[in-house]
């Protein structure tokens, strides 16, 4: 019971971080990010192991199970942030994670390896990826234009996204069953399966690390943002979003190292969908998310430029691989986004 009250007591955590120096807070954030990464890594190992027992093809494991595991840190950070009254942090983390996953992580993957264009997953799930982000922007513009007060994503938006999430997971499962023969059978299982008990132990242990890491990360990042004079959503969309995107980065590096960069594509596309439907959806259910004005002229456009670039690249690549210059383009857009964000917002704050 004391652990549950600690998780729910925001004043206790705010008091803990308020007296610390900036250096100590940065160390705390690094430790939290490490906990998130290790926890997510354990979860992925456990969940993928269980998934392989069911005989599901790699294509669905990458796009649903693995991306669900790697998106959990964003979900916990955003739900906790919304619950603690930091809607800018919650929304900025979801949108910033999409930009970091696709611009930074997938961009790097394209530069480092020849990534095959898997038509089956990209021509279906890829449209859900772009569509869910576009739906988020359209709803946001709608509440800005037709709303009476400040624009916010109400709880109804959260419930809508969570319903769409269930439909997405179901339809991806159906598509995977249809496309079982897309990947060679020897790729479905690459390692000796661990015991069921060990799988569940890794999932539960990873989940605990993720919850604890996310719970301490939010107030620490908020405290630094407040002292430096940077808005919450700026910190969320860069430092925190990158930190919670580390599991995707680790998955991408591992996939390249093992010679299966196509797993990264499924993971990134799936993670982008989940960042809208799961992360922002769950956060909006926890508390209505106020949309700061800089999302309309900065964060949303950056997200759509990166996602629609990715979509165009899929239709361009007739040879069946992503080109290196496309990775450089995505990386370039991401770097411009980060640099402009800090210069514009910090100057504006002072």
Image: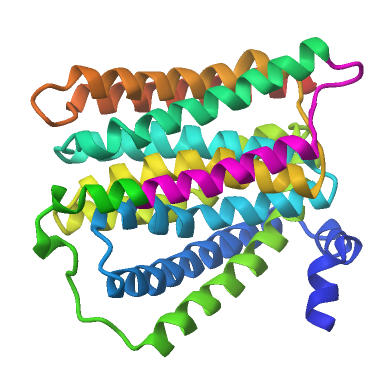
| In the depicted structure, whether residue 237 falls above or below residue 194 | above
Where does the C terminus fall, quadrant-wise? top right
Name the residue nearer the viewer: 188 or 93: 188
Please indicate, yes or no, whether residue 224 appears anywhere in the rendered image.
Answer: no
Q: Nearer the viewer, residue 14 or 295?
A: 295
- Residue 320 locus on image (x, y percent): 11, 30
Majority SS type along the magenta span: helix
Is 148 within the magenta? yes
Q: Residue at x 38, y 39 (%)?
A: 269
Instruction: Please tell me in which quadrant of the rendered image residue 161 appears.
Output: top right
Name the spot of residue 126 as percent of width and height, x first: 36, 32
Residue 347 higher or lower than 155, as above or below: above
Task: Choose top left, top right, bottom left or bottom right for residue 152.
Answer: top right
Closer-to-camera residue (269/252): 269
Question: Is 228 placed above or below 172 here?
Answer: above
Residue at the (81%, 12%) spot, across then down: 146
Q: Is residue 164 left or right of residue 126?
A: right
């Amino acid at each position: 019971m004391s652990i549950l009250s600690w998780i729910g007591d925001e004043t206790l955590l705010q008091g803990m971080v308020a007296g610390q120096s900036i250096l100590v807070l940065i160390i705390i954030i690094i430790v939290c990010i490490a906990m998130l990464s290790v926890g997510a890594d354990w979860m992925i190992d456990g969940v993928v192991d269980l998934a392989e027992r069911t005989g599901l093809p790699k294509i669905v494991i990458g796009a649903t199970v693995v991306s669900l595991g790697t998106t959990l840190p964003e979900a916990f950070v955003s739900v906790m942030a919304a619950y603690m009254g930091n809607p800018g942090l919650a929304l900025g983390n979801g949108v910033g994670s999409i930009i970091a996953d696709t611009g930074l992580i997938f961009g790097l993957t394209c530069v480092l390896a020849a990534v095959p264009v898997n038509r089956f997953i990209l021509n279906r799930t890829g449209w859900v990826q772009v569509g869910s982000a576009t739906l988020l922007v359209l709803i946001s513009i709608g509440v800005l234009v037709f709303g009476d007060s400040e624009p916010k994503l109400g709880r109804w938006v959260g419930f809508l996204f969570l319903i769409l999430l269930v439909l997405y997971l179901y339809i991806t499962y159906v598509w995977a069953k249809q496309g079982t023969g897309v990947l060679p059978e020897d790729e479905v299982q690459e390692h000796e399966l661990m015991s069921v008990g060990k799988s569940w132990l890794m999932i539960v242990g990873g989940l605990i690390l993720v919850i604890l890491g996310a719970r301490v990360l939010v107030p620490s990042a908020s405290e630094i943002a407040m002292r430096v004079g940077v808005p919450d959503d700026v910190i969320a969309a860069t430092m925190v979003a990158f930190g919670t995107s580390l599991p995707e980065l680790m998955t991408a590096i591992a996939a390249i190292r093992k010679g299966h960069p196509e797993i990264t594509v499924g993971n990134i596309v799936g993670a982008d969908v989940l960042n809208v439907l799961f992360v922002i959806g769950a956060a909006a259910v926890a508390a209505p998310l106020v949309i700061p004005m800089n999302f309309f002229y900065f964060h949303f456009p950056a997200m759509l430029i990166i996602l629609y670039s990715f979509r165009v690249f899929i239709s361009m690549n007739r040879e069946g691989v992503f080109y290196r210059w496309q990775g450089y383009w995505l990386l370039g857009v991401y770097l411009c986004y980060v640099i402009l964000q800090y210069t514009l917002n910090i100057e504006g704050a002072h």
